[in-house]
Image (spheres, rainbow, N blue to C red):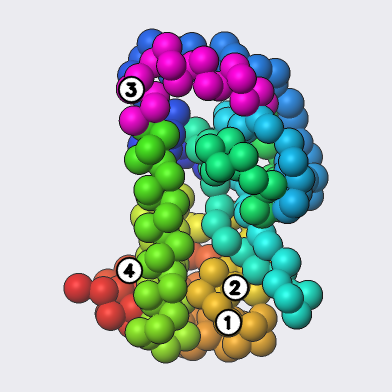
């Protein structure tokens, strides 16, 4: 299976020393999840972590009004399920494969021993958790301080920097996500998301395709997002 995205340097796996990285890749069982399959479900009491070896997944939650909100996305090299491992609480989100994804499932006991044997991996896990929390906090800050168009521009800049692929027309963001799903990252309904995507397209900052976005003018997008 081809990896649909480059592995970002900031993922959990890529921040590990060589010895720890090799040890982690030898743990657990490898599984293939087809697009649309759930790796874990909100409220589950399972006690394992999942390392994404290749692919892309999304974390979603169901709100009180029944709407499903996208919390985050993870790619090859990222770890999922670490918060439940630490807190012992049920899964806080449903994680679904956006593309065919190969993962490595590691039991809680095995992963805990791995952290004990590789202290650098424990520090890397702490950094991963802090980065995830900062992502959520930044989205809340954006929601309170910026209009929808700016919030969307800001999150598109982040996603393009983290997961984009250089193309003839700019930087392609091929995550397999709908405009509504990306809109939920910035707290807007699907209709609003589509309208704001059209606005960014009309301002020649982006072009849009089926479940894809291309950043045509990054500077203009940053300007709209009030990023300095």
Q: 130 above or below 190?
A: above
Which label's residue is closer to the chain start, 4 or 1? 1
Give the residue at the far left of this rendering: 228
Query: Earlier along the polypeptide chain: callout 1 or callout 3?
Result: 3
Q: Is residue 87 magenta?
A: no
Label whose residue precedes the other's in the sequence (3 or 2): 3
Give the Cα distance between marks 3 and 4.
36 Å
| Residue designated by label 4 | 218
Quarter holding the N terminus is top right
Q: CA distance from mark 4 to mark 1?
A: 22 Å
Classified by dominant secondary structure, the portion drawn in magenta counts as helix
- Above/below status of 76 relative to 216: above
Secondary structure type for disc 3:
helix
Tell me the quarter of the image containing the C terminus.
Answer: bottom left
Closest to the camera, between mark 3 and mark 4, is 3
Q: Is 172 drawn above or below residue 227 in the view shown?
A: above
* Label number found at residue 120: 3
Say which element carries label 2.
Answer: helix
Categorize mark 3 by other alpha carbons within 10 Å: few (<14), some (14-19), many (20+). Answer: some
Callout 1: 10 Å neighbours few (<14), some, many (20+)?
many
Badge 1 is on which residue?
A: 188
Give the crowd class for mark 4: few <14, some 14-19, many >=20 residues within 10 Å: some
Determine the image quadrant of residue 26.
top right
Residue at 42% over, 34% down: 125
Cα distance, mark 2 to mark 1?
A: 5 Å
Q: Of discs 1 and 3, which sits in the foreground?
A: 3
Please state which of residues 60 and 97 is positioned toward the viewer in this rendering: 60
């Amino acid at each position: 299976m081809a990896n649909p995205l480059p592995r970002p340097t900031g993922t959990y796996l890529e921040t590990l020393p060589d010895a720890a990285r090799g040890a982690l890749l030898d743990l657990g069982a490898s599984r293939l999840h087809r697009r649309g399959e759930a790796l874990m479900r909100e409220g589950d009491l399972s006690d394992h972590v999942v390392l994404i070896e290749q692919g892309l997944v999304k974390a979603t939650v169901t709100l009180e009004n029944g709407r499903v909100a996208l919390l985050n996305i993870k790619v090859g090299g990222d770890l999922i399920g670490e918060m439940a491992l630490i807190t012992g609480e049920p899964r806080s989100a449903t994680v679904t494969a956006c593309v065919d994804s190969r993962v490595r499932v590691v039991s809680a006991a095995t992963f805990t021993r791995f952290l004990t044997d590789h202290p650098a991996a424990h520090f890397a896990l702490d950094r991963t958790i802090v980065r995830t929390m900062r992502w959520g906090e930044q989205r809340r800050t954006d929601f309170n301080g910026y209009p929808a168009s700016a919030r969307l521009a800001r999150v598109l800049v982040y996603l393009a920097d983290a997961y984009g692929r250089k193309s003839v027309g700019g930087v392609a963001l091929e995550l397999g996500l709908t405009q509504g799903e990306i809109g939920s990252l910035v707290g807007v309904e699907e209709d609003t998301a589509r309208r704001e995507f059209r606005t960014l397209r009309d301002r020649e900052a982006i072009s849009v395709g089926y479940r894809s976005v291309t950043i045509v003018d990054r500077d203009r997008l940053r300007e709209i997002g009030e990023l300095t």
